[in-house]
Image (cartoon, grey):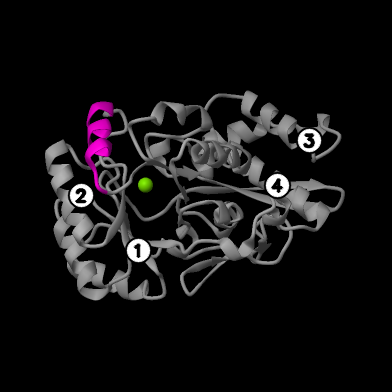
């Protein structure tokens, strides 16, 4: 990673990923598992999981629903490893049809949102440097939940007037202090607050969401489609990530469910290559907020894909998830 990535509960300088390749009839689809350690997956668990996969019983890669049900049934958990197969399968079928995924899903590539760029918890000097690097972005995401929340916001605000969102990563403890902080943040031009309390702290979450003048978005508290009904009354929105929900197929279902019950919908990512980020970006015309900057935080991207142009997610006119491998690690 370009900078150490510091959140309320952890700091790291690398993120293990695994790239998955599916071949059929001369076409190749690419997928990715990104595995930040706090989610419990690793190169070992992903290798074990992927070694169980045998797609030779399926005659046709377009049996997406059946294939992904089979993948999900192989073992519990392993959400990122499952996502790597899902992404590769969608890339493969898009390439066979020679159509970008957004087109298959009937989405307007002109409706992609601006993506936020993430500013991790740091000293004012480093924060200033990061904000300067992020000058092309139209919205910034500031990590809070450390010991210097107001200093973080004030430092960013000294340098830019763009809208900000904040991600507390479960770092706040006291509900009254949290609400006071949210009123202060609203004055500073913050547009939403992500995961203020521990994911299991239902009482504080419900109280805060009921009283907050800003949308309160669930991230760590939600992984898959089955978790969404349980968020009712606890959060006003949800941050959907391919690596949490087993991939594009389920993310599509989650976006539609969340919309149907009036939730704010956000699409996020881990630190990952342009493979995972380009895949998620295909769904971005559907969402209110996108935080798809994970590929911009790393030094060793091996794919060329989605671009951020004047802050906006810009989808390539290429089939599948729209990526090309620029460093062939498979040879
Ligand atoms: Mg988050």
Establish if 323 lies above or below 34.
below
Task: Identify the disc placed on residue 63.
Answer: 3
> Label 1: which residue?
140
> In 3D space, how far apart are the residues under numbered discs 4 and 3 (Cα atoms)?
11 Å
Q: Note whether ligand 1 is within 8 Å of mark 2.
A: no
The span picked out in magenta is 202-213
Crowd tier of the residue under label 1, counting other residues whose Cα lies within 10 Å: few below 14, some 14–19, many 20 or above: many
Residue 114 position, x and y percent, is 47, 64
Residue 15 left/right relative to 90: left
Residue at 22 percent of width and 39 percent of height: 211
Task: Identify the disc placed on residue 90.
Answer: 4
Depth order, front residue of 87/15: 87
Membership of 299 in magenta stretch: no
Q: Note whether ligand 1 is within 8 Å of mark 3.
A: no
Residue 216 position, x and y percent, is 32, 43
> In 3D space, how far apart are the residues under numbered discs 1 and 3 (Cα atoms)?
39 Å
Mark 4 vs 2, N-terminal side:
4
> Label 2: which residue?
182
Dividing the picture into quadrants, the one containing residue 132 is bottom left
Considering the numbered disc 2 on the image, is that residue within a helix, a strand or a loop? helix
Front disc: 3 or 2: 2
Establish if 136 lies above or below 10.
below
Considering the numbered disc 3 on the image, is that residue within a helix, a strand or a loop? loop
Considering the numbered disc 1 on the image, is that residue within a helix, a strand or a loop? strand
Mark 3 vs 2, N-terminal side:
3
């Amino acid at each position: 990673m370009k900078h150490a990535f510091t959140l309320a509960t952890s700091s790291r300088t690398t993120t293990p990923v695994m790239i998955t390749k599916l071949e059929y009839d001369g076409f190749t689809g690419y997928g990715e598992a990104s595995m930040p350690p706090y989610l419990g997956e690793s190169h070992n668990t992903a290798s074990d999981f992927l070694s169980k996969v045998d797609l030779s019983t399926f005659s046709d890669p377009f049996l997406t629903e059946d294939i992904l049900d089979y993948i999900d049934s192989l073992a519990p958990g392993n959400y990122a490893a499952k996502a790597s197969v899902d992404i590769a399968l969608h890339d493969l079928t898009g390439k066979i049809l020679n159509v970008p995924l957004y087109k298959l899903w009937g989405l307007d590539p002109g409706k992609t949102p601006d993506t936020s760029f993430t500013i991790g918890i740091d000293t004012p000097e480093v924060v200033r440097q990061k904000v300067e690097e992020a000058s092309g972005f139209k919205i910034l995401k500031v990590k809070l939940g450390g010991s210097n929340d107001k200093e973080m916001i004030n430092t960013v605000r000294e340098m830019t007037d763009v809208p900000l969102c904040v991600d507390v990563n479960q770092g706040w403890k006291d509900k009254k202090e949290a609400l006071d902080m949210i009123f202060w943040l609203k004055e500073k031009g913050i547009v939403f607050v992500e995961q203020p309390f521990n994911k299991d702290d239902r009482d504080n979450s419900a109280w805060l969401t009921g009283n907050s003048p800003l949308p309160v978005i669930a991230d760590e508290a939600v992984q898959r489609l089955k978790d969404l009904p349980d968020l009712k009354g606890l959060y006003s929105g949800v941050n959907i990530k391919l690596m949490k929900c087993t991939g594009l197929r389920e993310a599509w279902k989650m976006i539609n469910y969340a919309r149907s019950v009036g939730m704010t919908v956000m699409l996020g990512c881990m630190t990952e290559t342009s493979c995972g980020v380009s895949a998620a970006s295909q769904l971005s015309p559907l969402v209110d907020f996108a935080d798809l900057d994970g590929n911009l935080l790393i030094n060793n991207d091996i794919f060329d894909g989605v671009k951020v142009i004047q802050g906006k997610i810009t989808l390539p006119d290429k089939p599948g998830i729209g990526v090309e491998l620029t460093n062939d690690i498979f040879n």
